Image: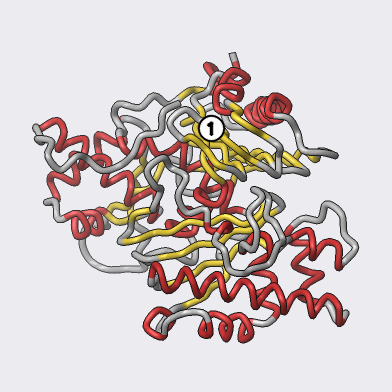
Amino acid sequence: MKVLHSGANSSAGQNRENIRQHNLSIIMSLLYKGGTLARSQLTSVTGLNRSTISDLVVELEELGMITQAEAVTSGGVGRPSLTVSPSANIVAFAVNPEIDATTVAVVSLSGEIIAKRRYPTQIQPAPKEAAKIAGELIKGLIKELPPKTRVAGIGVAVPGQIRIDDGVVRLAPHLNWVEAPIAAMIQQQTGLPTWVDNDATVSCMAERNFGSGRGASHCVYLFAGSGGIGGGVVVSGVQLRGASGYGSELGHIKISDSKKVDFSGLTGTLEALVKRDDLLEAFKLFGATDDELDVEVSNTKDPKAIKLINTQLDHLGRGIGVLATIFNPQIVVLEGFLDSIFKFNKERLLESVRASSLNSAHDGLVVSSGELGTRAVLIGAAGLAFAPLIQDPSGTEIYKLTKVSS
């Protein structure tokens, strides 16, 4: 259950086998993020010669991780070029336990959600209950998958502080989980290797790899759901994690002297002042999905609701202004209900950002809606299970359905 981190120690020597594994990993990473690519693109991007690319592609094809096909052309002379794609037969399961439901999805190696199941709960599930629900949903989904499917593992996205080395949830206040070994619990239910990380952290990388942040080397991501506000920061293409993996808890930055508390008991934070529950109360909703809440926000004409939304926009703008001054990102991506209020009055938010940050920090800054929406957390969670496979394609076990279901 230990998470593998990319990037070799710069002081480590490189033998021929290490170089081969490194090159296989580069090819898999490019295909994971880019989907179908021509062999010529792989040659151009990696700087490797055509013969080396050909050998690497053949090896990955023999491992069952990629497929090759002739490019579809409308004419031309000469032999058609070959394209390379991630195998459609390799999937991962994504699990997202929340206060009102546990969601499980099947995600392909190309980042497509193939199937999804949501199990509603009246109150927040205990860790054992969430693990049992996830296990049952996964077993049901396995029965619907084609026989040739292979499974990389399970990725779990939890709204809380995660010790990523062993998949223990140190604290998830909205779920009322403390020191919960959720990775071990789900692995016991399914027999599949399981990785766990913070929901906003994995969503950040999903948007960075597949969504609005694609191509940005410097990115701030803010995600808000029923578990509060979280985020992620990418600097020079690397996601900041901190000494113990708890970094980028952006919802807990202090932006006010207000005595309102967030879900971790801190006062005057972004999470304390921009709350989903306040919006639900304003619209007299209970247990609404993000999509349902988005409809209410976009269509409201109620003066009290509008006042609340504008107040939240002012607070959100202050938070983004602080983050822009610290990290100087190219783009800030908003997901969840933060995106809903942003779309309600974009200029008000941007005015607050400008008033709360240095000119040099907000000049050229783009604030954008997330492209993936509710898919981000599931695609990001699946990425946890795909990470070892991408890092070590020839040394990572992938599970056949017969072995998983037995």
Judge whether 110 appears above or below 75 on screen.
above
> What's under tag 1, amino acid-wise?
Ile
Residue 18 lies, in percent from the top left, at 16, 33
- Tell me: 254 left or right of 398: right
Residue at the top extreme of this rendering: 406
Mark 1, secondary structure of its residue? strand
Residue that label 1 marks: 154
Number of marks:
1
Judge whether 20 appears above or below 278 on screen.
above
- Tell me: 233 left or right of 192: left
Q: Which colour scheme is used?
A: secondary structure
Residue positioned 74% across, 43% down in the render: 99
Judge whether 236 appears above or below 54 on screen.
below
Residue at the right extreme of this rendering: 284
Residue 200 lies, in percent from the top left, at 55, 52
Residue 248 lies, in percent from the top left, at 47, 54
Residue positioned 40% across, 83% down in the render: 364
Residue closest to the eye, 209 or 195: 195
Residue closest to the eye, 6 or 167: 167
Mark 1, other Cα within 10 Å: few <14 / some 14–19 / many ≥20? many
Residue positioned 53% across, 85% down in the render: 355
